[in-house]
Amino acid sequence: MQCVSQQMGDAVLVSLSGRLDVESAAAAQRMFADVLTGGGSPPSMLMINTAELIFISSTGIRSLLLAAKQAKSDGVCLALVGLTPSIREILSLTGMLEMFGIYDSAGEALQSLRQTTVAAAPSVEIREIFGREIQESIRQIHRRVRSLGEGEVASYIPELSKANPDHFGLCVVTADGRLFMEGDCDQEFTIQSISKPFTFGMALESCGRERVNRHVGLEPSGDAFNSIELQSGLNRPYNPMVNAGAIAVSALLHAEHGDEAFSMVLERLSAAAGRALAVDEAVYASERQTGHRNRAIAHLLLNSGMVHEDVEQALDVYFRQCSILITVRDLGMMAATLANIGRQPLTGQQVFQPESVQSMLSIMLTCGMYDYSGEWTYRVGVPAKSGVAGGLMAVVNRQIGIASYSPRLDARGNSHRGIESCKELAQRFGLHAFDPLNAGSNFLKALG
Ligand code: GLN
């Protein structure tokens, strides 16, 4: 990447070219810091020319975002010039476009600075026809899948066995927040293991990638979600999606944030759902009273030094996070937040950093459906996470979030109707990551 700055009166033009990726982001960040704070008083306007930029990675986006935030807090006007369609798309998806005025040239940007402040970005238009088609498909899929009576409601947590096995809700939320629903989408249920990718993302952000990785691996286990098994030699849980890994992650959050840990989890999940969530106290009490297996796992982790001494407190975070009440609508919004690179589509809040979302989705793809993850990826091909209460969340990167609730589980603890619905949605709309219809990366598009 090349990064050149040029003084233009009391404004500065920074021209980026090539690839703004993990290798070059630090250089770009230094350049922005220099331009904004290096020469005494900050410039009146920071113009960024991206005409020659052919690729921007999530780390690159972070360097731009930091610069933009710094500029905003210093009262510096922000302008983008020479925006190509692919860079525009990326910045719009991450919500950053709105921070900048958009101009064809530096001259135009300077002229508008003299007259007024920045222009708002146009919102994405989704065609009505797409809306009608997707609603009709969800209705048809719901009708067909509803008739499937296989699977049993989970009973190892006594309170969960009270669920109505016939409840079934299915919803799709686009990355810009359009909601399509069918069935029991306002029925509350506990999130259970679907909380795991979110706490993993939080741990990455508050403890750093290396520390998290010392406590939990990144490999599919090929075993059941509650298996009492650690990676040989390292004595580390296989991944953050099985109970052992998720308990290690909750312990990290507790070690870092103490008694605040659970309220931070609840707050973050609420931000992703776009409304204040609460705990189902009866399920929480039931999990805590009967969670002997999880308690055994936690003590095994203490034995190998993978969790700190406060085992009971770490377990308490875990039991509470599993007992958070959500609806299919909430889960759809949470999935759409991940699809929208961490930004809640309706509130506009950046709930997770783009690079955390990349990590969360990767682990969901390889491990999110436990010992069905391989076949899931083969058949559906998108990151997903299931929970034993019957929820299922799937994410189509930068496109849509999918959520379902049906408490009838298959032998691996995944919702049977949820899996069937996602298989059909993926087929109908070409959602599989390797489907030839899938649009792919902006870098390849830029290569033409
Ligand atoms: N609370 C559940 C447990 O720990 C979560 C498991 C799941 O949803 N798969 O057993």
Image (tube, grey):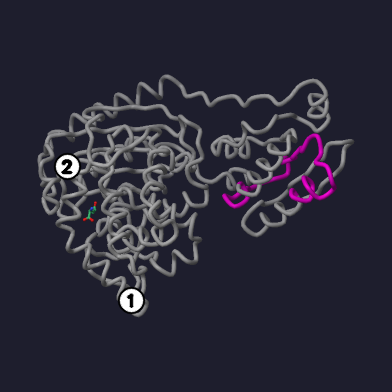
> Quick one: which residue is furthest to the bottom in this view?
233
Whether residue 34 appears in magenta in the rendering, the answer is yes
Query: Regarding mark 2 in the picture, which secondary structure is present there?
Result: loop
Distance between mark 2 and mark 1 Cα atoms: 35 Å
Q: Is residue 409 left or right of residue 19?
A: left
Residue drawn at point x = 38 percent, y = 36 percent: 273
Point out the frontmost of discs 2 and 1. Answer: 1
Residue 304 shows which numbered tag? 1
- The residue that disc 2 covers is 407
Q: Quadrant of the N terminus?
A: bottom right
Q: Give the percent coordinates (x, y) of residue 153.
A: 12, 45
Residue 384 in sight from this viewpoint: yes
**What range of the chain is rendered magenta?**
32-61
Q: Nearer the viewer, residue 225 or 144?
A: 225
Q: Amino acid at mark 1?
A: Ser
For residue 141, what is the image quadrant? top left
Residue 145 shows which numbered tag? none
Q: Give the percent coordinates (x, y) of residue 185.
A: 25, 30
Whether residue 57 appears in magenta in the rendering, the answer is yes
Image quadrant, ligand 1: bottom left
Query: Regarding mark 1 in the picture, which secondary structure is present there?
Result: loop
Q: Nearer the viewer, residue 430 or 53?
A: 53
Residue 382 in sight from this viewpoint: no
Q: Is mark 2 within 8 Å of ligand 1?
A: no
